[in-house]
Image (cartoon, grey):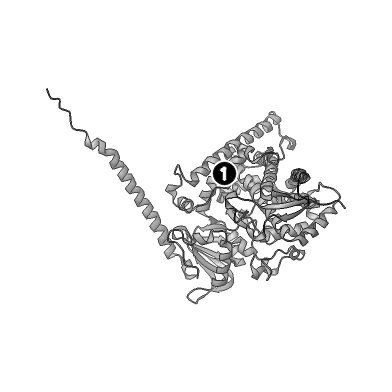
Amino acid sequence: MTLAFPPPPTKLLAAPFVVAGLSLCALTGYLAFTLATTYIRGWRSPLNVLPGPRPTSILMGNFGVVSEQEGARMMENWVHQFGRAYVVQSVLGRKKLLTVDAKALHHIAHHGDLFQRSEQAQHMFEAILGKGLLFAEGPTHRRQRKVINPAFGPVQVRKFTEIFVEKSNELRDIWLDLAAKSTRKDGRVRVNAFSWMNKVTLDIIGLAGFGYEFDSLHRAEDDQDELYRAFSRTINSKRSPFLFVQISIPILRDLPFGPVAESKRSTAIIREKGMELMQAKKKAILDAANGGSMEKADFGNDLISQCLKSNLASDLPESMRMSDDEINGQTPTFLLAGHETTSTAVSWTLFALACHSDVQAQLRAELVQFPHDTPSMDDLNSLVTLDNVLREVLRLYAPVTTFQRDVKQDTTIPLGTPIVDKYGVTRSEISVAKGDQVSFPIRIVNRSVEIWGEDAHEFRPSRWTDSAPEAAHGLPSVYSNLMTFGAGAHACIGFRFSIIEAKAILFSIFRNFEVELAVEPDDIVRRVAIVGRPTVANSPQEGVQLPILIRPIKPT
């Protein structure tokens, strides 16, 4: 007897392939439409009347040039070649305006409704840092800043100074112990300055930001806190062309693989730990109140506690309050702003002073005259040479090289100095269209010969003995006519914190040590990963580092 089997249900078997095929077609169509729309917008941009370099890639535009380590130098050359305002091609054909015109930059900085955070940067840094103040926009930004602002005021920074000094002196003592064990005849010892600056600023923001003791100064690299490791992974993640393409196309942003997904996993750890800390503080505050009114003493002095205090204030309208999730969203922001940028700035200060022994000696002469090793905020601000040195470093070695804004509607940008476009037309304003980008070239402006004089590229702290040059007075700024901390509604809220923190660290180091480079100055280059950090050119595999030689000064 022959058994007959029914034919396979070919239609049912084919169904999944049909669905997959249709999905693939839909995705391909979506990507093609997105790419076409973006490129067409770039071709139609009014910025095309401006001169500028030819793109090096159809897909990446001038990305391959402006993002490499010497990109800033190339952009400076473009200023000389194309003038005070020029256009470059960004990812997927978008047009980007770069200008060093003070009036134009001031207009952009103070019209946040027209020029907002770059969409690509916002998605990239949200993956790394979460939705904190740093990348909030519009009403959300204003609401968050109102709650957070008191935590960074002069009164609060004055209280934090004790933490800054305590941890800086802790670093000093560790370095003295290392020097005591030196086997060199000259008593010098080699250290990776960036690693130590990273640790001391992390310990500072841990205590000042969250009342949390990382104790990284006393831990080996392989024994660091889980929160430290998670943040290090996000901040050290490599930028790649795929990352910029991924954040430029919305449908690709939630892929379960790639650099964005990796950053999100690390950010989740930071947010989980941050929520634990915040909930513990909130519970302690409410328990202290015990159903009654809360006094100032019931709140801790750390940043998160102060944000909770401001958020729970009885005179704050309910509509202006931040949710627990929003307050916790500040954790990665505080870590970046209070840790990474300051450690980078102090590292470049060590580099600059190691290269200029005369300035280092002048600074040390000022510091050793101070009667004790626990200066107050007012004491630190009274030290003229220290102040001049830090200003000059923040001008010459700004941690953040540039930041972007997206144009939200068609508009014009006024110019302080008219330009001539590539068709020979003189223009006193620049037209931009919705979807175009504008760039704040911080490093270029801070080193502009037109603004700072012929020695703009030289480290000369004495330039700050007098006021900033007249040409710098029109620049958008919250600190010393420098664009280093941004300007306008999005200016760095923690700039006072960062300045006093840096001064405290430098006070402890140069009051007690002579500092030299352990390699040639030309071997130290900038490696950009959100901020421009030092690394050794011929040892990129060893990561970010600043090798120096330290020696305790001899008592007089």
Residue 213 in view: yes
Percent position of residue 23, x then y? 33, 45
Q: Locate the N terminus and report the quarter of the image it occupies.
A: top left
The residue labelled by disc 1 is 233
Q: Quadrant of residue 98?
A: bottom right
Q: How far across and down, in percent of the image, does residue 56 sit?
A: 46, 63
User: What x and y, as percent, mark residue 468?
Assistant: 72, 65
Q: Residue furthest bottom?
A: 424
- Foreground: 322 or 386? 386
Residue farthest left in this picture: 1
Query: Eyeballing the image, is 283 above or below 105?
Result: above
Circle 1 packing at 10 Å, graded few (<14), some (14-19), many (20+), is some
Identify whether 121 is placed above or below 417. above
Residue found 42% across the figure and 61% down from its top: 58
62 lies left or right of 337:
left
Q: In which image quadrant can residue 292 be found?
A: top right
Position of residue 387 measured from the top left corner of the image (x, y, whole percent): 76, 57
In this rendered view, identify the residue nearer to me: 464 or 220.
220
Kindly give the residue lying farthest to the top in the view shown. Answer: 1
Q: Residue at x 71, y 50 (%)?
A: 190
Closer to the camera, 189 or 524?
189
Give, as a three-letter code, the residue at label 1.
Answer: Arg
Question: Can residue 166 be seen here?
Answer: no
